[in-house]
Image (cartoon, rainbow, N blue to C red):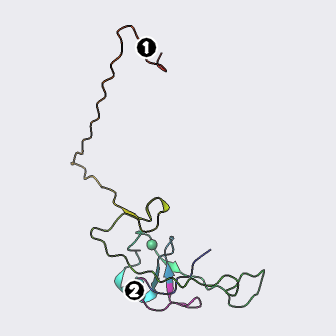
Amino acid sequence: MLELRPTCEHCNKALPPDSLEARICTYECTFCVSCVDRVLGNVCPNCGGGFVPRPVRPSKNWKGDNFLGKDPASTQIKVEAKFDPKPTNDNWEERQGVVAWARAIAPNETLKFSVAYTIGYPKDGAVAGLP
Ligand SMILES: [Zn+2]
Ligand SMILES: [Zn+2]
């Protein structure tokens, strides 16, 4: 279920649940239509995905209690996180507020990691688990 976040994460404009100006990305980052069109170029600054208009949740109980009275909109205001460089992953491993950066490697760049193990064992011994 969508949280129906209350404001634009960029300009902080109020986006009530019946707003036709709310735009969301697949992770429900929420922005107003003018920020999406004029500032963001229809690309979510948090996730890199595109936006769609956010559906309006009915305020009347038309069917099966699926309405704002039972499932109210979120009141938790999200603000755009200011990180430089931008983390590629926030809420790392589902932990709220933990961010992570993934390192992109350029085509001609080399990152080397080497790990060496020396296992000593008696000359006629065998390591358990090996043939
Ligand atoms: Zn906005
Ligand atoms: Zn997003």
Quadrant where the N terminus lies? Answer: bottom right
**Relative to the observer, which residue lies in front, 117 or 32?**
117
CB atoms at circles 1 and 2 under 8 Å apart? no
- Does mark 2 have its CB less than 8 Å from ligand 1? yes
Compared with 106, 8 (above or below) is below
Q: Dot 1, how many residues are within 10 Å of its Cα: few (below 14), some (14-19), or many (20+)?
A: few
Mark 1 to mark 2 CA distance (whole Å):
66 Å
Which quarter of the frame holds ligand 2? bottom left
Location of mark 2 (residue): 35
Q: Residue at the location (24% across, 45% down)?
A: 111
Would residue 111 be found to the left or right of residue 21 on screen? left
Residue hosting label 1: 126
Q: How would you rate the neighbour count of disc 2 (Cα within 10 Å): few for under 14, some for 14-19, many for 20 or more?
A: some
In terms of secondary structure, where does tag 2 sit?
helix
Q: Secondary structure at mark 1?
A: loop
Is residue 13 on the magenta stretch? yes
